[in-house]
Image: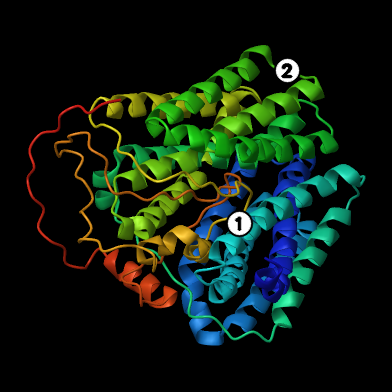
Amino acid sequence: MASSLLPIAGLLLSSAFLLMAGGLHGLLLPIEGTIQGFTTVQLGLIGTGWSVGFLAGCLAMPQVVRRVGHVRSYGVMASVAAITILLNLLIISPEAWIALRALTGFCFAGAAMIVESWLNERATKENRGTIFSVYQMVVFAGSTAGQLLMVITPPKEFFFFAIGAILYCLALLPTALSTAQHPQPLKTARLDIRRLYRNSPVAVVGCFLIGTVNGAFGTLGAVYAQRIGMPIPTIALLMAGAVLGGSLIQFPLGRLSDRMDRRKVLVGVCGGAIAIALIIVILQPRTPELVIGLAVLFGAMIYPQYAITVAHANDFAAPDEFVKIAGGLLLLLGFGTMVGPIIAAQAMQSFMPEGLFAFTAFAHVLLGAYTLFRMTQRGAPQGPAFRGVSVAKGGATPESVVLDPRAGEATSDDAGPAGPPEPMEDDDAADDGSPAEATHFQAAVTDPLTTAEVVAGTADATTTPADAADNAAASLDPTATSEPEEDEGPAKPGPG
């Protein structure tokens, strides 16, 4: 293990500093914005700005890197991110903060993609799983540590802004000094809603609604706590505790979903999230210990939902559809994180701080009801074991999905002969309840602000990861020709 990690220690260190800065920056702005008198809607728009910028960065960075190279691009992204957090201190204006937050999201996405592309270049078939697991641990630990800085140090007027800028600059050093060979060009993703919906309606609707909830809570959870009188250390513990709760329960829920219809597990966690949200709305707790405890339980219910939903979508897809499905659903999650903070902020401003949880309860009612309906339309296939990832902020970009070992499973040298992959099953097609060839993908969802999109793919055992990724991206191009679809007749209800 040490031999696999030692060559990438500098890259992992860069990621740790970057995620610490991102975690601190993301928590600092809503807290400081509330102190400065920003409205809840303005604070929600700051969170939306991050999502817009992050998604734009994922889409635009491949072109930037092709023009100026990896090292220069990373240096620019980390430097501009450091500048933006200092400008947040110098320019106290909601409009300026919205624009600066979008710029930060763009830079954060670009820097993370470049580091991850280096990790992809160093990963082999033998060590990819180890590198991926360690990287996800770094994602969680770095983001959470950044938030917890506000617990161990008394807040001062400029202190945390300066610390954030220092962390962004520290993230630059290991990568800038690296002598490693430059990796292949970055990958981009395309979105085919119709194809995704045919594969799994639950995943399409679910990823968008999950994005709205995660985006709302990640942006406005700190605002809620501040509005009800919680001190800053308690707010930091609340937000970090929610992520911790999601991380701890993700694997048990994933294993449970291996043994039953994943949609039943999804409905169960939706019910749990609704119950906790209603407890908060009705009881309006004000005791710090109780508020933190409820936040941990709430995070345990909301953060694993995305992994379960995408795993369900991949149950209906052929092995070589892994990246196509994951990439499109990550984009849908990103769109949800843009919308959620705006709606939740309106609910909080119009009613009460607990309006945040009233909104999340409503979104989970929609998701649970739609999932129950879909369970009457199609049965559940059987697939390989669940694999979870970090739910910490900033954990998913196109390059992090290429790093996922599941992106290359279809081309494993150990795999036996296989026929051509079955096409993604039309939702209207008849289902005989037989096991389907499938693959799972669970994306990293840190907090609602986390958006991403993906690209990569595999064609045969001799295809390089970069070539396979480009082939997958091309296959997602909506202008590409496709085989005519067969009219398979009306669906019949399946088991479960």
Q: Amino acid at mark 2?
A: Pro
Q: Which residue is mark 1?
A: 133
Label 1 is placed on what type of residue? Ser
Does residue 267 lie above or below 310 as drawn? Answer: above
Q: CA distance from mark 1 to mark 2?
A: 37 Å
Q: Residue at x 37, y 51 (%)?
A: 439
Task: Classify mark 2: helix, strand or loop.
Answer: loop
Secondary element under disc 1, as helix, strand or loop, is: helix
User: Comparing marks 1 and 2, which lies closer to the viewer?
Assistant: 1
Residue nearest the observer in this picture, 380 or 331? 380
Answer whether residue 191 is visible to the viewer in this image: no
Left or right: 171 with respect to 307? Answer: right
Q: Which residue is mark 2?
A: 285
Find residue 97 and report its image quarter: bottom right
Quarter of the image with the N terminus is bottom right
Q: Is residue 246 left or right of residue 419?
A: right
Name the residue at 23% across, 50% down.
424
Measuring from the top left, give residue 82's x and y in whole percent: 74, 67
Q: Is residue 337 above or below residue 238?
A: below
